[in-house]
Image: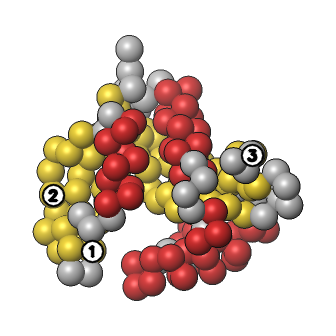
């Protein structure tokens, strides 16, 4: 298993992230401009995972938090990094960030066709609480939440 480091995503890596995002998410990808606007918002954090061996970008998570609630705005691993537990590490880092901010609930939405993500979220204890029809091209978004407060 490849060891990874997770740290705040520096602004100079946003273009690389946006390029990967387009390759992964296609028509629903965030643009570079959108990444910049989110990075500028208060109450958000962008974390990047890098492989320890070569320092390559392996994935990222963007979290927002306000009051008692946090959202996983996006999370992804690069094609080369899939199946190595990096997504799990990123999600845990995002949940830890939310807990450190005093959040009690973490929300997310996921494409109903994304079996790998659904399995990972369920393994963390996320539960479905609703659906958004046609949220993704040709698919519903499943709304999930995890209670993290004491």
Q: Which residue is mark 3?
A: 3
**Tag 3 or tag 1, which sits nearer the N-term?**
3
**x 40%, y 78%: residue:** 28
Q: Is residue 136 left or right of residue 102?
A: left
Q: Mark 3 or mark 2: which comes first in sequence?
A: 3
Question: Is residue 40 in sight in this rendering?
Answer: no
Asked if 147 appears above or below 59 in the picture, the reply is: above
10 Å neighbourhood of mark 2: few (<14), some, or many (≥20)? Answer: some
What is the CA distance from the residue labelled 3 to the residue labelled 2?
A: 35 Å
Q: Position of residue 124 (x, y in %)?
A: 39, 36
Image vertical order of residue 25 relative to residue 110, above or below: below
**CA gap, disc 1 to disc 3?**
33 Å
Q: Earlier in the sequence, mark 2 or mark 1?
A: 2
State which quadrant residue 15 falls in: bottom right
The disc placed on residue 131 is 2
The image quarter containing residue 35 is bottom right
Seen at 82% across and 51% down, the residue is 52
Position of 54 with respect to 18 (left or right) is right
Q: Single out the residue that lies furthest toward the bottom.
A: 27
């Amino acid at each position: 298993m490849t060891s990874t480091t997770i740290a705040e995503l520096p602004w100079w890596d946003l273009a690389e992230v946006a390029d990967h995002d387009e390759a992964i998410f296609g028509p629903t990808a965030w643009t570079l401009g959108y990444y910049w606007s989110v990075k500028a918002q208060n109450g958000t954090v962008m974390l990047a995972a890098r492989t320890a061996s070569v320092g390559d970008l392996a994935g990222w998570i963007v979290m927002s938090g306000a009051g008692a609630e946090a959202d996983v705005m996006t999370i992804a691993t690069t094609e080369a990094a899939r199946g190595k537990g990096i997504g799990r590490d990123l999600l845990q880092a995002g949940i830890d960030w939310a807990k450190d901010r005093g959040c009690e609930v973490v929300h997310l939405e996921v494409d109903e066709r994304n079996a790998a993500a659904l399995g990972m979220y369920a393994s963390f204890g996320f539960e479905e609480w609703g659906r958004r029809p046609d949220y993704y091209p040709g698919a519903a978004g499943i709304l999930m939440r995890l209670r993290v407060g004491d």
